[in-house]
Amino acid sequence: MNTQALIRNIEDLSATLNQKQLIAFLDIMDALAAMTAEAQQLAKQPNVPSLTSATPVTGGMH
């Protein structure tokens, strides 16, 4: 999805939300933007170890 389509979809969605829902949605978008910026900064650091594989979780909840 290109940026223009994403913006259009967000605008369409926001038109259907009440004020409380819109505030919560915008808070989520702000948090995602902050996490993206942090991840970009971490990716630029040469001494940050990268994960090559995930550790399996055993005994999870069912």
Image: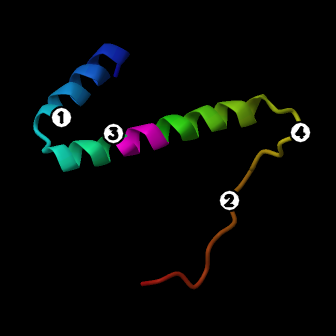
Q: Residues within 10 Å of mark 3 (few under 14, many from 20)?
A: few
Element at badge 4?
loop
Front label number (3 vs 1): 3
Work out whether 17 lies above or below 7. below
Q: How crowded is mark 4: few (under 14 residues within 10 Å), some or many (20 or more)?
A: few
Front label number (4 vs 2): 4
Q: Choose the circle earlier in sequence order: 2 or 3.
A: 3
Residue range (magenta): 27-31
The residue that label 1 is drawn on is 13
Q: How far apart are marks 4 and 1 (CA)?
A: 41 Å
Asked where in the image residue 16 lies, by quadrant, the reply is top left
Question: Do the residues under discs 3 and 4 have CB atoms within 8 angstroms?
Answer: no
Q: Choose the circle earlier in sequence order: 4 or 2.
A: 4
The residue that label 3 is drawn on is 26
Residue drawn 23% across the image and 42% down it: 22
Does the segment drawn in magenta span residue 56? Answer: no
Q: Main SS of the magenta segment?
A: helix
Q: Residue 47 carries which label?
A: 4
Asked where in the image residue 18 lies, by quadrant, the reply is top left
Q: Residue 54 carries which label?
A: 2
Q: Choose the circle earlier in sequence order: 3 or 4.
A: 3
Amino acid type, callout 1: Leu
Q: Residue 1 carries which label?
A: none
Say whether residue 41 is left or right of residue 12: right
Amino acid type, callout 2: Ala
Q: Choose the circle earlier in sequence order: 4 or 1.
A: 1
Q: Distance between the residues labelled 2 and 3?
A: 31 Å
The quarter in which the C terminus is drawn is: bottom left
Say whether residue 46 is left or right of residue 15: right
Residue drawn 34% across the image and 22% down it: 1
Question: Do the residues under discs 3 and 1 have CB atoms within 8 angstroms?
Answer: no
Q: How far apart are marks 4 and 2 (CA)?
A: 20 Å
